[in-house]
Image (tube, helix red, strand yellow):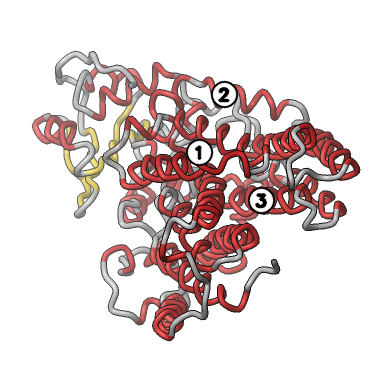
Amino acid sequence: MRPNWKSSLWWAALILGLIALWVTLQPITEADFWWHMRIGAWIQAQGQIPTRGLFSATQADSAFFYQSWGSEWLYAWLYQLGGLALIHLMRGLLVIGTYGLLAWHTQRRTNNGRATAVGVLLAASMAFTNWAVRPQMFSMPLFMGMLLVLTAVASERWSRRWLLVVPLFEVLWVNLHGAFILGPVLAGATAVGAWLDRRRDHVEAPTYPTLKALWWTVAGTTAALLVNPRGVGVIGYVWNLLTNPGSQELISEWRSPLSKLDQPTNQFFVLVLLISLIMIGVIWSKLRSADLLLYGGFALLALTGIRYTIWFGMIAGALTAEAIIRRNRLKLTKRSGEPTGLIAVVACVLLLLVLLVQAPWRGLLPLSGSLTPRNTPIARADLVHPDTPLAAAEYLLAHPPSGNLLNSEVDGSYLIWRIGEQIPVFVDTRIELYPLEQWNDYLCMAHGEDWPQLFERYNITTALLNNTKHAQLIEQLDQAANWQAAYSDDRFTIFERSGAASNTSPPCTRAAN
């Protein structure tokens, strides 16, 4: 049966409109964007990819692998071309493009617009907090594009010639983001699944020429990993990232979603996992082997780390929608029918709102919070998350410290972009650049423990502190005779040392985890 695109159009517009509105209203966060853009500007200026810890006060001479150099270069180029507004728009287009591909993929499997909307909603529900401006945003359409092509060819819906784009996608991916390793996984699972389908005489088993083409695609996609400035060294980068103790112990997205059930996306992950297990468990024998391999593999992967749930969602959403149709379990999806006028009206209203809140004219709307411009020389500050130390960085630029600056890893990202050339940072979100001992020392200082001795060890004469996250240290410095608050706003306080260290504090027993 040919897909009923006409009856599904408004359902797709409705769900994609919801996603577009949400992602457009999200500001640019500071954690994993600004330092990448600064490195991209350095690459443009120097004509080479750095290999050391640039802009770090403590690890400037330490080796660092800038695998995402392509994303960094793109960020710098986009900023020069259209500023933060263009980067913000690009993030939205990539997210919508990704879930648009998912909607297309799901519609082909279900031929039902409502089921497609359910599948995309399930996928988005466990990822809506993971659509930040960061190199991962380039991985999303590449992952979904690969999955769409491989599935369509393996089921004999598309010509085998489409497989030629899969290694090309991988060439882009390996230079944009660390999730590139998933490319050969997708190709390999599809080829193994096709082989199993032929062995068990599945009704959708591909022909032998298609199976052969899939195996050649696996080889080509794996070889494409080497098309990067460091060649085979990129494999070592992935291994080091996966085993780095700082990343594993400090970054919450490396932990299982089951350990962070207070977060809405993790709650949705558990819900979608249970729903999909039940639905797929009933019809598993009718699904292709590749579907089962990908679902099981990415479910296990997602259980090990929050960062993987976004990929599991794209696979589970489409399969759950197909299972719903096969079992006729939801009244909502039993009949496609023509969309009601209400659905069309709501979809049009959503799309109109999406246009209204785009960067060029969103400042004209009565929006508050992160959308309100602040007193800063940074153009389009209304697009930046309010926890970004915009004004505090300007103070530091005008009053550089005599020694080293203490800052959080999150704030370090923006500081690298704005003042890193003049004032190197203590830590930043290049987690694997800094040894675990330094992270332990930072956590001690951040919680007001053993800070006088550690300040002396690292020659810290200025501290940029978040009024909420560093409340304990702020209280200690307020009471210290040789430290004064030189700058303060509603989110940040900057302390400067006025004399020799002569303070004491409780000894630190805090571990990184």
Q: Is residue 174 left or right of residue 304?
A: right
Q: Residues within 10 Å of mark 2 (few under 14, many from 20)?
A: few
Position in image of residue 212 (x %, y %): 88, 38
Q: Is residue 74 left or right of residue 441?
A: right
Q: Nearer the viewer, residue 62 or 342?
A: 342
SS type, badge 1: helix
The reply to whether discs 3 and 1 touch (Cβ–Cβ < 8 Å) is no
Residue 357 visible in the current orientation: yes
Query: What numbered label is drawn on residue 142?
Result: 3
Q: Residues within 10 Å of mark 3 (few under 14, many from 20)?
A: many
**Circle 1 sits on which residue?**
281
Alpha carbons under labels 2 and 3: distance apart: 32 Å
Between 203 and 416, the residue placed more toward the observer is: 203
Circle 2 or circle 1, nearest the eye: 1
Query: Mark 1 is on which residue type?
Result: Gly
Q: Is residue 84 left or right of residue 1?
A: left
